[in-house]
Image (tube, helix red, strand yellow):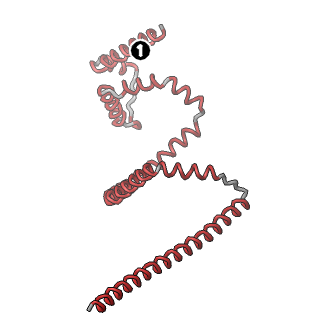
């Protein structure tokens, strides 16, 4: 019985030794594979380095290893900034994706509005209006524009005065009267008939208006000259 027990322990011990040897052998194989991989990578890396150096020399580029090392250190120091930049870029990209439908709607509405303006003739109007400026530029010299700028205040004051409601009403009445006259059938007046007409109230008011107008015009002219 003792011999059988001893034999069993020896057998178990041999099995454990076999497992240990197998494990050691596998580790050795892995180590060899790793060494082979490192060796292959070293060869490839050396070839890539030699090729890069040769290419740089052919292109007359001097590579300073200290500068390369400094660049790598700067990249490593700014990894956090690079991550922030990438996060910001991702945020912008997400915003563009979210805003794309809205932008599409804005573009569609803008295109419709442009088409509406085109249908109403806005673009054709502005194109024809541009010819007005072309004619002005063709017929007036820079000196004329300079003189106009010197008198623009007076011109605007005149326009503002002429566009007052009472002035517009007076001019409108004058245009109506002129339009109602039959120029081909204007009656003839003798001196005596004119004198009789001057005695009428409406003619007296007309003469009073004319005389008053001329007196005020002369007074305004004298005031400006002084």
In-front residue for pair 37/117 = 37
Q: Is residue 116 something that shows in the picture? A: no
The residue at 37%/16% (across/down) is 213
The residue at 64%/67% (across/down) is 46
Q: Among all residues in the image, which is located at the extreme top?
A: 226
Residue 121 location (% of width, % of height): 40, 53
Q: Which residue is mark 1?
A: 217
Crowd around label 1: few <14 · some 14–19 · many ≥20 (10 Å): few
86, above or below 215, in the image: below
Query: Can you say which quadrant of the picture contains the N terminus?
Result: bottom left
Name which quarter of the figure residue 18 lies in: bottom left
The residue at 31%/31% (across/down) is 173
In-front residue for pair 102/108 = 102
Name which quarter of the figure residue 143 lies in: top right
42, above or below 93, in the image: below
Residue 153 location (% of width, % of height): 45, 23
Residue 41 location (% of width, % of height): 58, 70
Helix, strand or loop for disc 1: helix
């Amino acid at each position: 019985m003792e011999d059988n027990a001893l034999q069993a322990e020896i057998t178990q011990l041999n099995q454990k030794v076999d497992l240990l040897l197998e494990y050691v052998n596998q580790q050795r194989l892995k180590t060899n594979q790793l060494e082979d991989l490192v060796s292959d990578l070293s060869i490839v890396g050396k070839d890539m380095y030699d090729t890069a150096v040769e290419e740089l020399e052919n292109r007359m580029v001097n590579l300073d290893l200290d500068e390369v090392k400094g660049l790598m250190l700067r990249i490593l120091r700014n990894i956090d900034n690079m991550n922030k930049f990438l996060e910001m870029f991702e945020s912008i990209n997400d915003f563009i994706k979210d805003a794309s439908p809205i932008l599409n709607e804005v573009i569609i509405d803008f295109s419709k509005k442009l088409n509406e303006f085109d249908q109403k003739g806005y673009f054709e109007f502005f194109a024809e209006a541009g010819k007005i400026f072309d004619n002005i530029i063709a017929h007036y010299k820079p000196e004329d524009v300079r003189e106009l700028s010197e008198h623009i205040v007076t011109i605007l004051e005149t326009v503002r005065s002429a566009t007052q409601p009472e002035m517009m009403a007076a001019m409108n009445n004058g245009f109506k009267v002129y339009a109602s006259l039959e120029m081909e059938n204007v009656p003839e007046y003798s001196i005596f008939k004119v004198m009789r007409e001057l005695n009428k109230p409406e003619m007296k008011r007309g003469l009073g208006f004319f005389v008053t107008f001329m007196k005020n015009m002369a007074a305004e002219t004298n005031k400006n000259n002084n």
